[in-house]
C-alpha cells in the first residue's frame, strides 16, 4: 500500500495550506451566503470549494473565486424571489450578523451603511470587513478595478458626510 500523496497541489498550495485556507474562509463564505439570504449557506460555501477544486484551469485568486462563486450560487438559489432586494440589508440588521462583524461595525455606521446604494455598500463591505483586495473585489463583482476603487471611495465619502454633519475632521477620513 502506498502512503497518501501529501505533495498534492491545491489552489492554495499544498494540502496543509488548503486545510488552513478552508478553516479560515469557510465561516466567512457561509456568512457571505447568508447576506444574500441563502437558505443553505453552509452547502453553498462547501459547493464553492468543490467547484474550485474541480476546475481544470487554475485561478489566480482562489479566495476571490470562492466569494464570486458563493455570490452566484446564493443569487441563483434565490432566483424565484428575484424581485426582493438582494443587497446586504440582512447584514445591517442588528442581531443578524455574527458577533465578530458586529464588533467591526458600530451601530451608527451599520445604520448609515443602509443608506448607501447596494453597489457602494457591497464594494465597501468586501474591502473593509472581508479584507479583500481591489483586484479580488473586481473579480467577484465582475467589474473593472477602477470601478471598485470609485465605489469604495464614494461609499466612504458618503459615510464620512453622513457621520460628520458639523464639518470637522472625522475618524472615517
Image: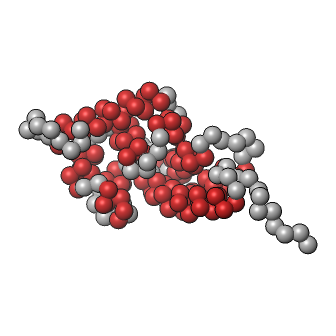
Q: Is 121 placed left or right of 73 in the picture?
A: left
Q: Residue furthest right?
A: 1
Q: Is 87 placed left or right of 79 in the picture?
A: left
Residue 41 visible (yes or no): no
| Percent position of residue 52, x then y | 66, 49
Please tell me how many numbered marks the rendered image carries: 0
> Is residue 90 shown above or below 95?
above
- Write the residue at 25% across / 55% down: 106
| Percent position of residue 173, x then y | 23, 38
Q: Depth check: 102 or 19 in front?
A: 19
Q: Residue furthest left?
A: 166
Quarter of the figure that contains the N terminus: bottom right
- Write the residue at 46% across / 36% down: 134
Quadrant position of residue 23: bottom right
Indicate how the structure is coloured in the image: secondary structure
> Is residue 119 shown above or below 15?
above
| Percent position of residue 145, x then y | 47, 30
- Write the residue at 55% across / 44% down: 64
Q: Depth check: 60 or 162 in front?
A: 60
Q: Is 131 placed left or right of 142 in the picture?
A: left
- Write the residue at 24% across / 49% down: 109
Quadrant position of residue 152: top left
> Is residue 142 shown above or below 87?
above
| Percent position of residue 158, x then y | 24, 35
Residue 82 visible (yes or no): yes
Q: Depth check: 86 or 92 in front?
A: 92
Amino acid at each position: 500500500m502506498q502512503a497518501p500523496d501529501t505533495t498534492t497541489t491545491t489552489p492554495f498550495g499544498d494540502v496543509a495550506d488548503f486545510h488552513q485556507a478552508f478553516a479560515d474562509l469557510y465561516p466567512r463564505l457561509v456568512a457571505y451566503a447568508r447576506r444574500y439570504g441563502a437558505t443553505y449557506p453552509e452547502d453553498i460555501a462547501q459547493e464553492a470549494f468543490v467547484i474550485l477544486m474541480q476546475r481544470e484551469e487554475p485561478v489566480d485568486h482562489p479566495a476571490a473565486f470562492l466569494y464570486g462563486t458563493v455570490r452566484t450560487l446564493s443569487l441563483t438559489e434565490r432566483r424565484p424571489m428575484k424581485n426582493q432586494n438582494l443587497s446586504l440589508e440582512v447584514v445591517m440588521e442588528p442581531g443578524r450578523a455574527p458577533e465578530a462583524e458586529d464588533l467591526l461595525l458600530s451601530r451608527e455606521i451599520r445604520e448609515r451603511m443602509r443608506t448607501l446604494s447596494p453597489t457602494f455598500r457591497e464594494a465597501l463591505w468586501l474591502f473593509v470587513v472581508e479584507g479583500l483586495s481591489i483586484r479580488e473585489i473586481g473579480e467577484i463583482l465582475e467589474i473593472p478595478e477602477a470601478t471598485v476603487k470609485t465605489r469604495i471611495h464614494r461609499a466612504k465619502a458618503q459615510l464620512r458626510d453622513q457621520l460628520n454633519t458639523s464639518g470637522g475632521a472625522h475618524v472615517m477620513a
